[in-house]
Image (cartoon, helix red, strand yellow):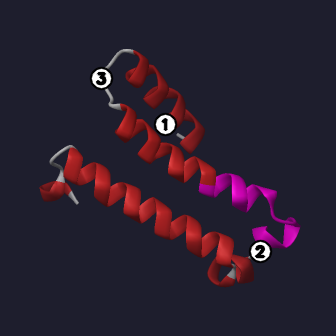
């Protein structure tokens, strides 16, 4: 499963009122960070960039923040 699939599922859950707007917007922050990575030049896809590029670092920070926020919102702390 790719993140696009997660976001598509989240959209359906939001429209079915099973996900709040805040939760959906939280997930969209990861999508926005991936857009930045994909907009970078081709060097972003190298091993060196993966460990050193600001874009990848920011994506990891955003993804971790989103994971923690949603885990708290959904009471998943014991599962992480």
Q: Position of residue 38 (x, y in %)?
A: 76, 56
Q: Which mark is residue 6?
A: 1
Q: Position of residue 36 (x, y in %)?
A: 71, 59
Q: Which mark is residue 76?
A: none
Displayed quadrant of residue 25: top left
What is the secondary structure assignment of the residue under circle 2? loop
Q: Which residues are magenta?
A: 33-45
Give the residue at mark 3.
Answer: 18
Q: Which residue is mark 2?
A: 46
Secondary element at tag 3: loop
> In the image, what residue occupies the spot 15% across and 48% down?
75
Residue 69 vs residue 47, the one in the foreground: 69
User: Pointer 1: residues within 10 angstroms few (<14), some, or many (20+)?
Assistant: few
Q: Is residue 53 left or right of residue 64?
A: right
From the top left corner, tell me how far across and down residue 9 is, in percent.
46, 27
Q: Disc 2 versus disc 1: distance between alpha carbons?
A: 25 Å
Which residue is farthest front?
22
Dot 3, crowdedness within 10 Å: few (<14), some or many (≥20)? Answer: few
Is 38 contained in the magenta span?
yes
Mark 2, other Cα within 10 Å: few <14 / some 14–19 / many ≥20:
few
Q: Is residue 65 visible?
A: yes
Quadrant housing residue 2: top right
Q: Residue at x 71, y 61 (%)?
A: 37
Quarter-of-image position of residue 58: bottom right
């Amino acid at each position: 499963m790719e993140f696009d699939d997660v976001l598509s599922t989240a959209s359906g859950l939001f429209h079915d009122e099973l996900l709040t707007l805040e939760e959906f917007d939280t997930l969209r922050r990861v999508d926005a960070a991936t857009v930045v990575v994909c907009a970078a030049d081709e060097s972003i896809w190298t091993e060196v960039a993966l460990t050193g590029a600001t874009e990848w670092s920011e994506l990891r920070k955003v993804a971790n923040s989103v994971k923690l926020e949603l885990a708290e919102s959904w009471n998943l702390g014991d599962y992480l």
